[in-house]
């Protein structure tokens, strides 16, 4: 059994029954419990949490943690293990009755003024992977400071204290644990952010694909309430996710694409199993990149919902965002890759929207973290408000803004090779790529080579896997592939 617990950008993730075990979940819960009881800012008696509760007009008598789980193998049972560990440490628990999307858990943490939330989820990982996400009181995945503090507090596998809590699967050992359905409050929140009046009269037909995940209890319930015709697939339970990796990309959504075209639906929407990312299929059955959806939604929020503020995006997200932000006079800020950096900015309340190219969107007046459910509903909201299909909206959008094309590839490399590539690019970066001069180099995260004319190539290491990722964007549809090819040549020349 793997006894090491290492945190990535979104918590702890490992192979089920290897690194992700009942014992390790219990150890994590004990480490988190100590963090809750002792941290001077993020803990129950902490300055930050107290100010947060005061701002909501609430005073909590006892620390409360929200606990949830996705649809993966053993997720519910491991959530019970965590809940039992919390109550053993004097912490109250409200646990989800149904599979709980991460953004719903985050909203619930804020809505109930909980000190935090724990979700057992492997997000969009393969079926044999699972994990633990810790949500801070502000409704977003815990930042580096929090995770570092928790890591120092995790007891060893043979610590005597672990014997005080049962690791039995499927049993809640204390009456202190309250089982609850969190859907009602969250769906009411969605109704406050969506133009439900327009939705009722739009007569839209929407295909939904929760990818066997927790969105199955949310999409249909919300849309049908407001008169939308819904056709769904993969709404049943399947811990193997139909034999596919359950992300909301074009490969995983091929069946949704067929459903959209065969049933002549207006749109197809999908979320990965824990609903922090989204996927969109247009009426022609084509997958639409979040690099297109995010700028269109930003334009929609500013024009139709009159929202104002700054904009933040990861450094490798499309420059289409820049065009929209400039047109509306919005200040733009780049962040390293990883939504936690965007969440940190969104908590300031100054940002109307935060986004990343891999399908994450956060908006103001909601949680500061990515919400795939809301992103999908906002696309539908845009169609209903404008009374047009997505193809028409894209055509109008590109009359105002210059269309850009992008491409991304990942190349497996050893840790030694990755370090060598990054060191060489730092010392001796290319001065031209594909016979175009490098105008500027952005080293916010890896290296983004911005070329004369605005095209760019980015080379950066993955933060979670032994991969080098290459990204390219240009106004010429054929150029991104050529830039990626040049990027591979640069890497090969170093090794």
Image (cartoon, rainbow, N blue to C red):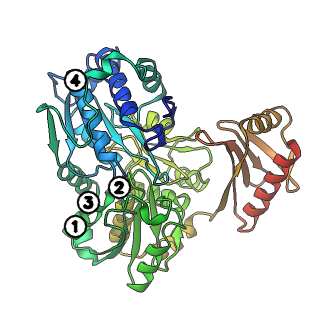
Category of crowding for the residue at label 1, using alpha-carbon neighbours closer than 10 angstroms: few (below 14), some (14–19), many (at least 20) = few
Please say if the residues under marks 1 and 4 sit with CB atoms less than 8 Å apart.
no
Q: Which residue is mark 3?
A: 217
- Calculate the distance from the C-alpha at mark 1 to the C-alpha at mark 4: 47 Å
Sequence-first tag of 1 and 4: 4
Which mark is nearer the camera, 1 or 4? 4
Say if residue 122 shows up in the picture.
yes
Q: Which residue is mark 1?
A: 197
Residue 385: which disc? none
Q: Secondary structure at mark 1?
A: helix
Say if residue 392 shows up in the picture.
no
Q: Which residue is mark 2?
A: 374
Q: Which residue is mark 4?
A: 88
Which mark is nearer the camera, 2 or 4? 4
Q: Whole-percent x and y of residue 68?
A: 28, 43
> Would residue 35 appear left or right of 341 to someone viewing this image?
left
């Amino acid at each position: 059994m793997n006894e090491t617990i290492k945190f990535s950008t979104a918590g702890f993730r490992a192979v089920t029954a290897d690194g992700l075990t009942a014992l390790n979940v219990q150890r994590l819960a004990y480490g988190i419990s100590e963090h809750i009881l002792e941290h001077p800012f993020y803990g129950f008696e902490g300055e930050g949490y107290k100010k947060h509760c005061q701002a909501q007009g609430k005073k909590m008598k006892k620390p409360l943690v929200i606990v949830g789980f996705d649809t993966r193998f053993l997720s519910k049972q491991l959530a019970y293990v965590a809940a039992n560990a919390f109550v053993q440490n004097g912490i109250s628990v409200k646990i989800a009755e149904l599979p709980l999307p991460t953004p719903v858990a985050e909203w619930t943490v804020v809505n109930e003024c909980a000190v935090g939330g724990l979700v057992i989820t492997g997000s969009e990982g393969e079926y044999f992977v699972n994990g633990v996400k810790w949500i801070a009181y502000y409704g977003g995945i815990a930042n580096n400071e929090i995770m570092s503090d928790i890591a120092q507090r995790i007891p060893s596998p043979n610590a005597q204290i672990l014997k005080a809590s049962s690791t039995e699967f499927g049993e809640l050992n204390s009456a202190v644990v309250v089982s609850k359905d969190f859907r009602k409050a969250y769906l009411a929140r969605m109704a406050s952010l969506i133009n439900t009046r327009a939705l009722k009269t739009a007569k839209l037909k929407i295909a939904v694909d929760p990818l066997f995940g927790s969105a199955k209890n949310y999409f249909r319930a919300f849309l049908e309430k407001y008169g939308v015709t819904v056709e769904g697939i993969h709404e049943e339970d399947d811990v193997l996710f139909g034999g596919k990796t359950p992300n909301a990309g074009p490969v995983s959504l091929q069946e949704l694409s067929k459903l959209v075209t065969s049933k002549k639906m207006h749109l197809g929407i999908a979320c990965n199993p824990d609903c922090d990312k989204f996927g969109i299929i247009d009426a022609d059955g084509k997958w639409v990149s979040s690099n297109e959806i995010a700028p269109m939604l930003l334009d929609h929020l500013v024009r139709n919902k009159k929202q104002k503020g700054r904009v933040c995006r990861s450094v490798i997200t499309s420059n289409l965002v820049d065009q929209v932000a400039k047109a509306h006079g919005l200040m733009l800020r780049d962040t390293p890759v990883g939504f936690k950096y965007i969440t940190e900015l969104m908590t300031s309340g100054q940002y109307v929207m935060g986004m990343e190219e891999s399908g994450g969107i956060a908006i103001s007046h909601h949680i500061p973290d990515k919400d795939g459910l809301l992103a999908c509903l906002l696309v539908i909201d845009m169609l209903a408000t404008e009374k047009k299909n997505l193809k028409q909206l894209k055509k109008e959008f590109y009359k105002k803004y210059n269309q850009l094309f992008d491409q991304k590839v990942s190349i497996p490399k050893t840790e030694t090779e990755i370090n060598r590539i990054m060191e060489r690019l730092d010392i001796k970066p290319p001065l031209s790529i594909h016979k175009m001069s490098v105008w500027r180099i952005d080293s916010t995260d890896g290296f983004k080579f911005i070329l004369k004319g605005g095209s760019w190539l980015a080379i950066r290491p993955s933060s979670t896997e032994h991969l080098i990722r290459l990204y390219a964007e240009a106004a010429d549809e054929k150029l991104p592939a050529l830039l990626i090819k040049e990027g591979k040549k640069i890497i090969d020349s170093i090794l």
